Image (cartoon, coloured by chain):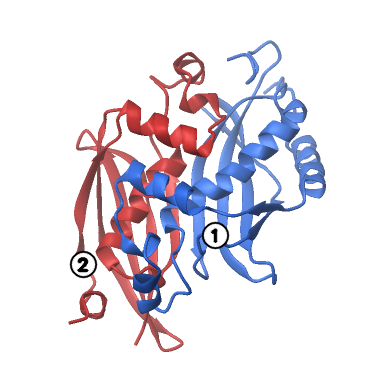
Amino acid sequence: MIEDHVITEENLFRILQKIENEIGEKEVKSSESEIQAFCEIIDDRNLLYFNDSIASELGLEGKIIPLGYLMSLTNKFIQDIFIKFGPLLFDKIKGVVHVFSEVEYLRPLLIGKKYLIKIKFDRPVKKVGRKGTSFNVNFKTSIIDINGIVHAVDNHYFFFKIRKEGEFKSNES
Amino acid sequence: MNLEKDLISNLKIGDSIPNYSVIIDKKTYLQYNRLTKEINPLHFNKKYAQKMGFDDIVIAGNFLYAYLLKWIVNWVRNINYIKKINIKFLNPVYLNEEIVHSGKVIDISKKNGCRIITCEFNVKKNGEIITSSGTIILEHPK
């Protein structure tokens, strides 16, 4: 098969490593109003997200960020990567599709507390299917506190749909 | 009576998680996209989504995950038991489609004095198309 795609997995991995080295860590802190807005959107009235004393009854230090919001938090960091490093990627890919996540909850995340998000990339895995060529890329995002203790990990896998010569670019939508 | 302890202590292999149905409408999804400052055009630009081979804008996996966890937390009632979730997004979910979450306990083992409860789940639309599936690992100190 003639390889007419605009990037190889090795080149993509080099770009991802460059991103990993340059992006560093991002500080995140979810406010009460942000979590309240999220809970209203999904109609979740669990008092653990609104009431400190209910949370402490479960042995928690205070109101917690809903577990279901974790992926939204890590995705914000991933979006920042696409914004900052888009020019390195967007002429090579048609688009990205989130296909799989493996999320580990190690410790609760508290509302109003500062955390850091870090990212690490695995080597992309090439997939050739009916709909074209993709690279499976793991954005391993870890949420850690200021003492370096890991609270959660999201292995967030995307298919990078790779552009062929002449195909539209992801920024030509 | 401690309901969450009762529920989790009495779980057996084969027990079902009560189904949970959701329909995500345009207004709700726009609110979520605004909150998370979504930038992937797949999630708000129909023309782009169609170029990518989808019928319409695709609801983000992150948002579907939010409903999955709401379902699980409401079932287990204690977030401390939830340790790990694997989710594979298999088919797109579009606006106004009803998705139904269902699942069951498939394994119970013991490790370090805890009961490790493994559940499998899937989310279907139109009664038959699996849009996502995966596993949930619960850890219950006993």
Q: Is residue B93 visible?
A: no
Image mark 1: chain: A
> In the image, residue A104 lies at what x, y percent?
51, 63
Q: Which chain is blue?
A: A
Image mark 2: chain: B
The extreme top residue here reads: A166
| Amino acid tagged 2 | Gly
- Side of B40 relative to B44 (left or right): right
Number of marks: 2
The front one of B55 and A56 is: A56
> In the image, residue A66 lies at what x, y percent?
42, 57
Q: Nearer the viewer, mark 2 or mark 1?
A: 1
Q: Compared with residue B70, is residue A108 higher up or lower down, i.e. above or below?
A: below
Residue visible at 54% across and 49% down in the picture: A73
Q: Colour of chain B?
A: red
The front one of A8 and B73 is: B73
Q: Is residue A96 visible?
A: yes
| Amino acid tagged 1 | Gly
Quadrant in which the N terminus of chain B appears: bottom left
> In the image, residue B55 lies at what x, y percent?
38, 19
**Residue linked to disc 2:** B14
Tell me the SS state at disc 1: loop
**Residue A82 sits in quarter:** top right
Q: Compared with residue A26, is residue A169 higher up or lower down, i.e. above or below?
A: above
Cα separation, mark 2 vs mark 1, equals 40 Å
**Residue B95 sits in quarter:** top left
Residues beneath discs 2 and 1 located on the same chain: no
Quadrant in which the C terminus of chain B appears: bottom left
**Residue linked to disc 1:** A112
For disc 2, the neighbor class at 10 Å (few under 14, some 14 to 19, many from 20) is: few
Residue visible at 41% across and 46% down in the picture: A38
